[in-house]
Image (tube, rainbow, N blue to C red):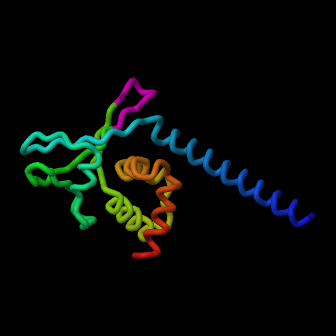
Amino acid sequence: MKMGMGHSQQQSQRLALGLKQSLSLKMQQKLHFGDFISTPKGRCPRCGLQLDEEQIKAGFSADPQELRTTCPNCRYKFLAHLIITRKNEGGNVEEVIYLCKIQALEQLLHIKQKRSRIGIAYLAKNDRQLFYNIIRHWGSYSLGLRALKIYGEHH
């Protein structure tokens, strides 16, 4: 009976710690980035086709250094963007390059190898574009770091 209670108590402590860390990350995110919405934008400059997010993603090559997507209509390569709209700043808008998941992971891996640690404050100061792409692809900074851990184990 004691083992069952100890196990339950340990799970509760882990859950509480996990929630505390998650809230701390969300507070840091709001402090450095504010409340925002990201919207993919990809209009081919050659033929004018407006690509949806799936078409933008499908147009990326396997080369993580090639940041351009490919128009499914005319095969022209161009940069797609994320439009960042700030909720609390009167709809203030920022535009950054839209990266595919592999490009974002490669950039994260490069920073991690260079610095050994990747913090929200560092990204806020040095690579906001990467942070917005992490949130777009994984929904949260912590899930992006988990994806990096898995990716890093294979590369």
> If the image is split into quadrants, where does the N terminus sit?
bottom right
Q: Nearer the viewer, residue 18 or 31?
A: 18
Is 87 placed above or below 113 here? above
The residue sitting at 10% across, 43% down in the picture is 45
The residue sitting at 40% across, 47% down in the picture is 136
- Res 33 quadrant in image: top left
Q: Is residue 144 magenta?
A: no
Q: Farthest residue in the top direction?
A: 90
Q: Position of residue 10 (x, y in %)?
A: 79, 60
Magenta stretch in the rendered image: 84-92
> If the image is split into quadrants, where does the C terminus sit?
bottom left
Q: Position of residue 116 (x, y in %)?
A: 49, 68
Q: Nearer the viewer, residue 122 or 106?
A: 106
Q: Is residue 89 magenta?
A: yes
Report the label total: 0
Q: Farthest residue in the right direction?
A: 1
Q: Nearer the viewer, residue 82 or 48?
A: 48
Q: Position of residue 138 (x, y in %)?
A: 45, 52
Task: Examine the residues drawn in magenta and state their main secondary structure.
Answer: loop
The residue sitting at 15% across, 51% down in the picture is 72
Q: Position of residue 2 (x, y in %)?
A: 92, 64
The residue sitting at 45% across, 27% down in the picture is 88
Relative to 7, 38 lies left or right: left
Relative to 23, 153 lies left or right: left
